Image: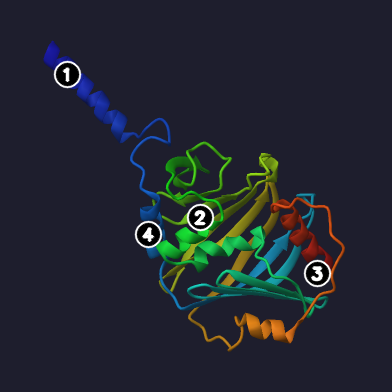
Amino acid sequence: MRPRCNYIWFFLITLFYLTGFPEPGCGYVLQGSHLLDLMTVKTGKAERIQVMQSLLIYDDNPLGDPIVIKETVRYLFPDSFRSDTETAAAKRIHVVSGNTAVTVIDGRITDELDSDLDRYKDIMLYRSRISLGERLRSLGIDITITSLGRFQEKIAYVLGAQYPDASAPQLWIDRETFRPIRWLIRHSTLPDVSKRLELRYYNWQRIQGVWYPLRVEFYEGEQLVREIRVEQVKINPPFAEGLFDLSYIRAMYQPAPAAAPESTDSEGIGDIQKTIDEFRKIFE
């Protein structure tokens, strides 16, 4: 009888491993640097990318119609980005070059900061393990910490936290494709989960050897506040000179008049609401 018992135990153990672990956090987990290397390599290489998209701004009523704005974004690798939005009411330009950013609204420079809502583009802009790792570390993600988690029926690597901890900044990378699916941005001075900004990346498509997400959703807590829907992606199109030249842009536009200080959270969530309100005001 003992050989038969051993056979049964061997069958049960084999079945257990074939059907997966009961908890997503179990099993072998890749190191952060290896994850970033796989992610950036599998995203593909390009010198330039131009994207035509619609930017949807939602109000407090999730059933209401959003504000819809047409936007053109351009990537000039390795570290430059530009967003142009224009309607009959106003024009907005946001340019990032290296660690510096400039925003121009209706011909006036309003600030020189990259807000949390602008950070969605970072995982597409920084296309090497070293540059992306440095960027994520600067935004509070500890890339030495990795675990496995489950999100919307997908198993993913969690970079920056031990699953299911949602208190730390973290980037989720699909275990099968090594493409980002979720980014939690939160600040140590804002422990309330309702104040967390969460980015979700959907419908990654391969265009001329380069992968790009065709939909990005922005959540403040559980509320959808913003959405990007991509209509067209061009790989390596020609760009006019000066599009990313911050010195040229500062020379072309004057600073906006100083405004009275507002009472907002100093660590980012006030900036999020400010950016949303700014779009509503100038494009409604």
Q: Crowdedness of circle 3 by 10 Å Cα count: few (<14), some, many (20+)?
A: some
Residue receiving disc 4: 37
Q: Residue at x 41, y 55 (%)?
A: 178
Choose mark 3 or mark 1, whichever is in front.
3
Nearer-N-terminus badge (3/4):
4
Amino acid type, label 1: Asn
Mark 3–mark 2 distance (CA, rounded to whole Å): 34 Å
Residue 235 position in % (x across, y down): 48, 77
Residues at discs 2 and 1 in contact (Cβ within 8 Å)? no
Location of the N terminus by quadrant is top left
Instruction: Give SS at disc 3.
Output: helix
CA distance separating discs 1 and 4: 43 Å
Q: Position of residue 146 (x, y in %)?
A: 43, 44
Residue tagged by mark 3? 283
Mark closest to the chain's N terminus, 3 or 1: 1
Q: Say left or right for 44 vs 220.
A: left
Query: Do the CB atoms of the residues marked 3 and 1 lie less than 8 Å apart?
Result: no
Q: Position of residue 187 (x, y in %)?
A: 64, 47
- The quadrant in which the C terminus is found is bottom right
Viewer-nearest of labels 2 and 1?
2
Label 2: state its secondary structure: helix
Which residue is under mark 2? 137
Query: Earlier along the polypeptide chain: callout 1 or callout 4?
Result: 1
Q: Nearer the viewer, mark 2 or mark 4?
A: 2
Relative height, residue 76 to residue 38 (above, below) = below
Do we see residue 177 in this rendering? no
The residue positioned farthest toward the bottom in the image shown: 241
Q: What amino acid is at disc 4? A: Asp
